[in-house]
Amino acid sequence: MDANARAQLSSILSDLREVSRQMNNAAAQLRDMRGVGTELCADRLEVLADKYDAARRHLSNID
């Protein structure tokens, strides 16, 4: 893998980490709220964050 591809992969991994972090933060904030569906929305955000983390882990294995 050349330097340009490595830099792009690093950028993608960083973006995936940030999106996952933001989803988890949003889920935590939703859990503090009261209302119809907030718990379900928080759960779904956490599931999506886990999927982004899994994608990041798979991509980090690329050489």
Image (cartoon, rainbow, N blue to C red):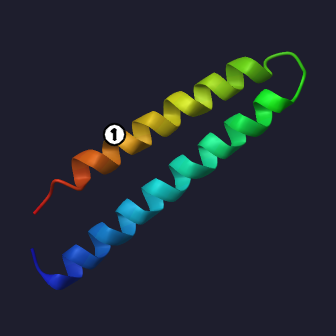
Q: Quadrant of the N terminus?
A: bottom left
Residue at horizontal 14 percent and vertical 58 percent from the top: 62
| Identity, as a three-letter code, of the amino acid under mark 1 | Ala
The residue sitting at the right extreme is 34
Residue at horizontal 32 percent and vertical 44 percent from the top: 55
Callout 1 secondary element: helix
As drawn, 2 above or below 10: below
Q: How many marks?
A: 1
Q: Quadrant of the C terminus?
A: bottom left
- Drawn side of residue 34 relative to residue 13, left or right: right
Residue 21 is situated, as x and y percent measured from the top left of the image, at 56, 50
- Drawn side of residue 59 relative to residue 11, left or right: left
Q: Which residue, given by chain and number where applicable, does mark 1 sit on?
A: 54
- Drawn side of residue 6 relative to residue 14, left or right: left
Of residue 30 and residue 37, the one placed in the foreground of this image is 30
Residue at horizontal 60 percent and vertical 33 percent from the top: 45
Residue 2 is situated, as x and y percent measured from the top left of the image, at 11, 80
Alpha-carbon neighbours of circle 1 within 10 Å: few (<14), some, or many (≥20)? few
As drawn, 8 above or below 3: above
The residue sitting at the bottom extreme is 3
- Drawn side of residue 22 relative to residue 54, left or right: right
